[in-house]
Amino acid sequence: MVKIPGFVYLLIGVVVAGYSQFAPNSDMPFFNIFFYIGIVFIFWGVVKMIFSPSKRREKTLEHQEKTSGIIFCPRCNAKNFSYSRFCHMCKYKLR
Ligand SMILES: [Zn+2]
């Protein structure tokens, strides 16, 4: 899948929906379709912007875990083996 940032969808949506409203033939039923397509794009863009950053963070953590076998404790930042359930320094629950 090609990665398109959420704001690109948002921009396309605004342009399409805006154009359909201000175009010379905007009272034609045909243009309503463009308006709804624009709304869908705006909605999808917002959804993407809300959900993509956390997903990316999860992926890098997963990647780090798989490649090095070492994870960092979120509380004390101590190095721990990826299979350990608790931090060996502060006993923070890692999973
Ligand atoms: Zn710790």
Image (spheres, grey):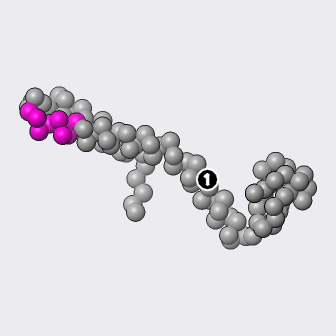
Q: Position of residue 3 (x, y in %)?
A: 42, 57
Magenta stretch holds residue 78:
no
Q: Amino acid at mark 1?
A: Arg
* Residue topped by disc 1: 57
**Which residue lies at the image location 44% right of the left edge and 43% below the top edge?**
47
Principal SS element in the magenta part? Answer: helix
Q: Height in image: 4 above or below 65?
A: above
Q: Quadrant of residue 2?
A: bottom left
- Tell me what residue is drawn at x 90 percent, y 59 percent: 88
**Res. 78 image quadrant:** bottom right
Seen in the image, is 74 located left or right of residue 54? right
Q: Is residue 13 visible to us here?
A: no
Q: Quadrant of the C terminus?
A: bottom right
Task: Classify 18 as above or below 1.
Answer: above
Looking at the rendered structure, the number of numbered marks drawn on it comes to 1
Q: Is 90 positioned to the left or the right of 51 in the image?
A: right
Magenta span includes 32:
yes
Residue 24 in picture, x, y percent from top left: 9, 30
- Segment colored magenta: 28-35
- Number of other residues with Cα within 10 Å of mark 1, as a class: few under 14, some 14 to 19, many 20 or more: few
> Can you say whether 69 is above or below 17 in the image?
below
Depicted 80 relative to depicted 12: above or below: below
Q: Residue at x 25, y 42 (%)?
A: 37
Q: Is residue 75 left or right of residue 27?
A: right
Q: Is mark 1 within 8 Å of ligand 1?
A: no
